Image (cartoon, rainbow, N blue to C red):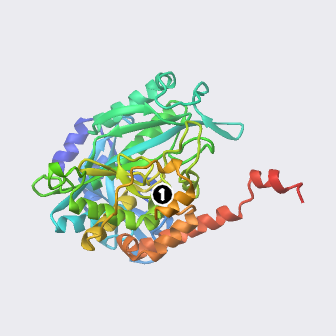
Amino acid sequence: MIDLQEQLAAQGVHTLLAQFTDVHGVAKGKYVPLAKLPELIETGAGFAGPSIWGTALPRTGARAEYYARATAQAIQPMPWMPGYARAVCSGYVDGQPFDACPRQVLQRATGRLAERGWTLKTGIEPEFFLLKQEAGQWLPADDADRLHKPSYDLKSLPRQAGFLHALSDALTRCGLDVFQLDHEDAHGQYEVNFTFDEALASADHLMLFKLAAHALAEQHGMVFSMMPKPFANQPGSGLHFHVSLWDAGGQCVFAPESQASGTLLSTLGRQFLAGVQAHSAALCALAAPTVNSYKRLVVGESLSGTSWAPAYIAHGPNNRTAVLRTLPKRFEWRLPDASANPYLATAALIAAGLDGIDRQLDPGPDCTEDLFSLPLAAIRERGIGLLPQSLEQAVDALERDEVVRGALGDTLSREFIRLKRAEWIEYARHVSGWELQRYAATF
């Protein structure tokens, strides 16, 4: 402990950011002087429990206090904030791991894997927008970013080189292996990719990425946004997961039993895939957790030609039109959007995959067709299911799914469902400008 404290002080750190994540996937926390590092690790920084979304903690008594307890191995300086180090924290209440802390939820899930000698690795691909607000409107930060097909635009990309380089440099100095940055399919939309890691570490990395991106965008006079779909006629932002499972000997258990078989996944890998496929409707509530998420999860033409967001529950080799894209020794889960809480989405994914293994589910034949090109009648003829088309439908599916709710635990599943139902009702009762324009003088 003293060695760590001295090491941080030698790097110029004077303050710790005790950071935890709430149910919505938003980073929360407070500043703690470096001298209080031992207390932060042993006891944690205290917070009023009822002030944190999703805790359902009381206002009085021992359980009214939420303690964010740091992990020594997950403390590192933040290059974009000289003198400050981020301390990744998990929630504790009354001296015990708090069952409704999203990071504790994922730790429980990875613990289930560890009991079987397995480790899940994920590569999370965040897409995001750089925006500005003018005259009450949200617009791309770059006024000149107007190509009809902006994918991989090498005119707009250099104009954001300062921000993107600062972000890449900050993440690299924090130990992430950044291997590419690009302009995505919408105006003002970008993607940063860093190498896959153990599932809990990947979720921690995603939260670090968000902290850095928010701060650096503000320094560059912009707003960093992971809203799934800010512009109706353009693609939304995904948070695709590349998923693989490994044994204690460092071997990928998703690797096919025989290279000559021509299959991309092992039998166990296909069973895990089948579980994720079978629970897709309930997983939708966690992977696409906002009202706005369902503006993305539709099939149709967009500015760049397609939305790239899956609407159909299917799997296929290198098929980006299916919710599950199979690749050698891994699959890409294309359902999550940028607003997903990475801890909860990953924990639910693990529960669904293990259910597929335990029940020895078969995902069915590969889908090699372009599902975006098929009419809905043809989709139905093939027996391919449709993902929930609203937050309300997704929450209904979650409430019916004991496996996915079990991954969250009783407290968090109740709170999540309550909060998301309230979000849907508030949206449903809102009178939009579209409604006024269409109906105000019509009848």
Q: Does the rendering let one see residue 68?
A: no
Q: Where does residue 398 sit, x and y in percent of width and height? A: 47, 71
211 left or right of 179 in image: right
Say if 414 sits above or below 132 in the image.
below
**Image-based side of 302 in relation to 119, left or right:** right
> Could you tell whether 352 is left or right of 42 in the image?
right
- Residue 43 falls in which quadrant of the image? bottom left
- Density class for disc 1 (Cα within 10 Å; few <14, some 14-19, many ≥20) is many
In depth, the one of 79 and 322 nearer the eye is: 322
Q: Residue at x 53, y 63 (%)?
A: 388
Q: Is residue 118 left or right of residue 405?
A: left
Q: Is residue 170 above or below residue 25?
A: above
Which residue occupies 33% across, 37% down? 171
| Quarter of the rendering containing residue 208 | top left
Residue drawn at (61%, 43%) of the image: 231
Determine which residue is flagged by label 1: 312
Residue sitting at x 47%, y 67%: 54
Count numbered badges in the picture.
1
Indicate the quadrant containing the C terminus: top left, top right, bottom left or bottom right.
Answer: bottom right
Where's residue 96, x and y in %?
29, 72
Q: What kind of element bears circle 1? A: strand
The relative height of residue 337 versus residue 180 in the rendered view (above or below) is: below
Q: Position of residue 152 (x, y in %)?
A: 46, 29
- In the image, 326 versus 38, the foreground residue is 326
Picture coordinates of residue 138, whole percent (x, y): 64, 40
Q: Is residue 400 visible?
A: yes
- Amino acid residing under circle 1: Tyr
